[in-house]
C-alpha cells in the first residue's frame, strides 16, 4: 500500500528563496490528504503534477496565513473545475466563517458539499477513521491554537500462503475468512489453523505532522514511535531565544523531539527566510538524529 | 517620467497553463500601484524582481477570487517584512470585513496603517489625486459589482528653453515660475513672454483597466481616447453566448471597445483556461484593432 508524503512548501511566514509556505500532500493507498494549504498551494500542485481533484480531505493546523491562505483559492478552483464529490475539511472553528464570508461576497454557491470538522485545540482526539487511515490531532504549543495531525495506516489483512492452501485444496471462498485471521474447521473435520496458512501483514506505519510549536514535552506521548515525524525547524539553535519568543523550534530541538519519541525518520521544514541555504539546519539536526531529511518542495518521502 | 505597466497574471478564474490569475503593477514616476491581486501575486512579484515594499496603493476591481485572493497574503508579508509606511487600499466595501476577520483569527495587528477607500459600484468617481496621477473608477457590468480604474498622469510643468534663458541672463530663481507657465516682468521693465522661453510638456497619458465585464457601451465614455486600454478578453468570439452568460467579453469585442473609444493601444488578458495557446485570441482582436498585444505575465508595456 502506498503511504507517502510530497512536500509542497517548506518556508515559514512568507514565500522566499524559491520556497513556498507550508503545505503537504499525503497519499495513503491512492487516497489524498492535504495538510495545510499556504498561498500558492494550488500552483504547487500543478507544478508537481498532482491533481487537486483527487484530494478528499484537507487538514488545517492553525490560522496563521502561511498555513491556510491558499485554502479559499483551492476550494474555489475545485468548484470552478466542476467538482461534485464531497470534501472534508478539518481545522479551527473560524475557518467556516472566513470561507463563507468570501463565498458570500463572490456570490459563490459551491457545487460540492464542503463538510466542516472543527478541531479541538485543547485535547488530542481521533478525528477521522476510514478504511485506509486513522487521523488523530496533536496538541501543539503555539501563539494561537494549533494542532498537528498523526496519520496511522489501517492494519492490513493477513497475507495468504497460497501454495499451501492450493496443496490442501482449500476452497477460494474461504480465503477472506483466513485473511481476517480465523481458524477454520472444514465439513470433513480438518482444522485449518490460521497461522499455518497466512502470515501477518506489515505493521501499520504512522506519520506525525507537527507544524508550528514551541519545544514542549506535552505532545511527545501522542507521537511516540512514529515512523516518520515531520517537525518544524524554523531556526538554527543559536536563535533559540527568537524561537522561544515566537513559539517555534530550532533544528536541534526538532531532532531532540525525534530522538525522545523514538521516531524512525525525521523531516524538518518551515525554514525562516533568514536561511538562504539549508545545509546548516540539516547538519544541526543530524548531529542529534541522523535520519533527518530536509522537507523541501517537490520531494516525496516514503513513510 | 516613467508610466508603464507590468503584467503579473493573465488567466481568468484559476491558475493554469503557466498563467496566474489577474494582477498588474503600474509604475508611474517610480511610485507603484498594484491593480488586482490574485492568489500568488506576491510570488509573481518576486519572480519578476519587483519589490512589494514599494507599493503604496492597491486597487481591487471586485470580489471574485481570481482578482483578490492574494491580497491577504501580500498584506501579511508586508507586515512580516517590517513595513511601517501607510498603504492605501481601494475596493469594494466588504474587503475590510474579509481582511479584518482573518487578521483577528491570526492575532495579527498590522505594523503599518492600512487605509481603506471604498469604491462606489454605481457611479464613476475620482478616487485618488496625488502629485503623479489621478485615478477614476470605471463602472463595469459584471455578475457582482465591479469597477475598472483609469489612471491619468498629472500634466507636467512646462520645459525650459535653457539656452534662451541663459542668453537673456534670466535669474535661476525665476525658472520655477516660468515652468508653471507665468509671463514675467523684470525690474528693468523687460517682459518675458512664457511661450518664448518654454515649451509645453508632453500630453498626459492615460491607462484604462477594464477587468471583468460584459460588452456594454455604458462605460465607453469614461475610457475615451485612453492611450493604453487593458480589456479582458476571456473568450474567442465563437463563445459569445458563454461570454454573455458569464458577463465576460470576447477578444473581438475587446477590440471593438478599443476602436470605439479611440484607444491608441490595446492589451488583452483574463484568458479562459480552455485556451492553451493565445495566438487565436490575439489574431481575432487584431483583425479589428491592429495595435493589440497579449497581456502575458512578465511583460512590461510603456503607456
Image: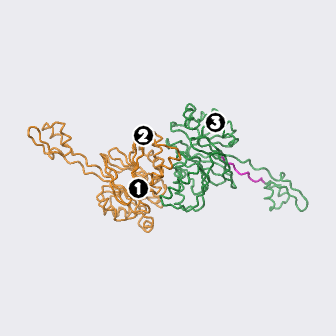
Chain colours: A green, B orange
Q: Is residue B160 above or below residue A156?
A: above
Please give left or right for residue A40 compared with residue A120 in the image.
Answer: left
Image disc number at residue B61 = 1
Residue sitting nearer the eye, A70 or A284: A70
Q: For label 1, count other residues whose C-alpha is less than 10 Å away and answer few (under 14), some (14-19) or many (20+).
A: many
* Residue A266 percent coordinates (x, y): 64, 40
> What range of the chain is rendered magenta?
A150-159
Which residue is label 2 attached to? B84
Q: x, y percentage for residue A183?
A: 85, 55
- CB-based contact (under 8 Å), mark 3 and mark 2: no
> In the picture shown, does residue A213 fall above or below A33?
above
Looking at the picture, tell me which residue is in the foreground, B114 or A277: B114
How packed mark 3 is, by other alpha carbons closer than 10 Å (few <14, some 14-19, many 20 or more), is many
* Vertical position of residue A10 compared to residue A237: above or below: below
Q: Please tell me whether mark 3 or mark 1 is closer to you in this view.
A: 1
Q: Are marks 3 and 1 in contact (CB under 8 Å)?
A: no
Q: Chain of mark 1?
A: B
- Residue ID for mark 3: A255
Q: Is residue B291 left or right of residue A224?
A: left
Q: Residue furthest top?
A: A238
Question: Residue B235: where, in percent of width, then height?
Answer: 43, 63
Q: Secondary structure at mark 1?
A: loop
Question: Given this view, does label 1 or label 2 mark the residue nearer the observer?
Answer: 2
> Which callout, 1 or 2, points at the residue further toward the start of the chain?
1
Q: Are marks 3 and 2 on the same chain?
A: no
Amino acid at each position: 500500500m502506498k503511504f507517502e508524503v510530497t512536500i509542497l512548501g517548506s518556508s515559514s511566514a512568507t514565500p522566499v528563496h524559491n520556497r513556498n509556505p507550508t503545505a503537504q500532500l499525503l497519499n495513503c493507498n491512492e487516497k489524498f490528504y492535504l495538510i495545510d494549504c499556504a498561498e500558492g498551494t494550488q500552483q504547487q500542485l500543478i507544478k508537481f503534477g498532482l491533481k487537486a481533484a483527487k484530494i478528499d480531505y484537507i487538514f488545517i493546523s492553525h490560522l496563521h496565513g502561511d498555513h491556510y491562505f491558499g485554502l479559499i483559492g483551492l476550494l474555489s478552483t475545485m468548484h470552478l473545475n466542476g467538482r461534485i464529490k464531497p470534501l472534508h475539511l478539518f481545522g479551527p472553528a473560524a475557518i467556516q466563517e472566513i470561507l463563507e464570508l468570501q463565498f458570500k461576497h463572490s456570490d459563490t454557491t459551491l457545487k460540492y458539499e464542503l463538510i466542516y470538522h472543527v478541531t479541538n485545540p485543547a485535547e488530542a482526539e481521533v478525528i477521522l477513521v476510514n478504511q485506509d487511515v486513522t487521523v488523530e490531532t496533536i496538541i501543539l504549543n503555539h501563539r494561537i491554537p494549533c494542532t498537528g495531525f498523526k496519520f496511522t495506516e489501517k492494519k492490513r489483512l493477513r497475507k495468504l500462503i497460497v501454495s499451501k492452501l492450493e496443496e490442501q485444496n482449500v476452497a477460494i471462498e474461504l480465503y477472506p475468512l483466513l485473511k481476517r485471521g480465523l481458524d477454520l474447521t472444514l465439513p470433513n473435520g480438518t482444522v485449518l489453523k490460521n497461522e499455518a496458512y497466512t502470515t501477518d501483514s506489515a505493521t501499520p506505519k504512522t506519520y506525525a505532522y507537527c507544524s508550528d510549536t514551541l519545544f514542549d514535552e506535552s505532545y511527545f506521548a501522542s507521537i511516540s514511535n512514529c515512523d516518520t515525524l515531520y517537525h518544524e525547524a524554523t531556526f538554527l539553535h543559536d536563535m533559540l531565544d527568537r524561537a522561544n519568543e515566537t513559539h517555534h523550534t530550532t533544528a536541534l530541538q526538532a531532532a531532540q523531539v525525534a530522538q525522545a519519541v523514538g521516531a524512525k525518520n525525521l523531516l524538518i521544514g518551515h525554514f525562516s527566510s533568514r536561511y538562504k541555504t539549508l545545509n546548516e539546519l540539516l547538519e544541526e539536526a543530524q548531529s542529534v538524529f541522523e535520519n533527518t531529511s530536509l522537507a523541501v518542495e517537490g520531494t516525496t518521502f516514503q513513510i
